[in-house]
Image: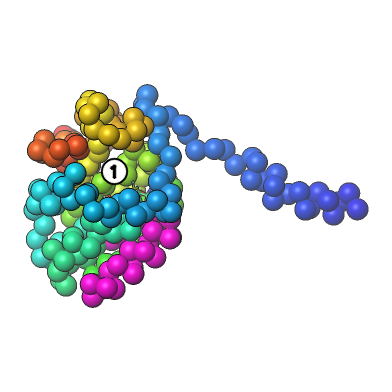
Amino acid sequence: MIRFSLLLLLPALLIAQTPPPPAEYQGRIIARTMHWEAASWLIRHKRDQEEATLLMREQLKLMPGMSVCDMGSGNGYHTLPIAEAVGKEGKVYAVEVQPEMIEMLHQRAEGKGLTNIVSIIGEMDDPKLPPASCDMILLVDVYHEFSYPEPMLAGMKKALKPDGVIVMVEFRAEDDSVPIKPEHKMTKAQIKKEYLSNGFKLVREFDGLPWQHMMFFGAEKPGE
Ligand SMILES: C[S@@+](CC[C@H](N)C(=O)[O-])C[C@H]1O[C@@H](n2cnc3c(N)ncnc32)[C@H](O)[C@@H]1O
């Protein structure tokens, strides 16, 4: 009887022993992941204007045939126009940890007849992208939510083609007028600190967005 009860208790004990994700990284509080039930906020009417999203995507200089990852794609606000820009010869990897977001993204992509989106359900510490597969990995309002930044950065680095870039778009923590909770914002200095200490170099910046930083990072090559 006692043995039987212990067996029943085992899953609960195992869950209790799983360590909680870290709360902090390099002095920054890690934000909680945005829940899929709030996904309608990502496709709100005023987003184009508030974040100047067309201008942001112009800065990506997307070309037909490119292979782009929309990391933490959510319900595909940026994935769909990127898929249109890279065309049938190109590809967009939409990586998400919440399958419900990917389900919504698929429904939206079907409505537009897009067939060049490859969805990937990633792990919190592994983007599960194929090696050397991406010309660009875009993270819009995502990186600050990574529970495990270091393995995610290492996984993304492996997924970049030799001259590939990671594009970080994050709400500006230096600016109190940006109406976003503090843990969902980052300073430029913090972004640089975290990327440079993980083997990346800053290759370009665009400072023309109303609320966000836009910073381009490449992988440091041996000898640099
Ligand atoms: C605030 S939403 C932004 C969605 C989208 N990038 C956009 O701009 O509309 C952040 C998304 O990142 C996803 N996310 C958080 N951690 C992740 C990880 N380790 N790998 C992949 N996606 C992640 C969350 O599930 C959530 O959908």
Query: Which residue is found at the position 13% from the left and 63% from the top?
Result: 85
Q: Check disc 1 and report its element: helix, strand or loop.
A: loop
Give the residue type that dot 1 points to: Asp
Question: Residue 105's spot in the image, x, y percent?
Answer: 33, 63
Magenta-colored span: 93-115
Does the segment drawn in magenta span residue 109? yes
Residue 87 appears in the picture as rendered = yes
In the rendered view, tell whether residue 104 sits above or below residue 153. Answer: below
Residue under numbered circle 1: 141
Instruction: Identify the image quadrant of residue 27.
Output: top left
Does the segment drawn in magenta span residue 97? yes
In the rendered view, tell whether residue 67 sits above or below residue 152. Answer: below
Dot 1, crowdedness within 10 Å: few (<14), some or many (≥20)?
some
Q: Is residue 162 left or right of residue 28?
A: left
Question: Residue 169's spot in the image, x, y percent?
Answer: 22, 42
Query: Which residue is found at the position 64% from the left and 45% from the top?
Result: 15
Question: Residue 109's spot in the image, x, y percent?
Answer: 27, 69
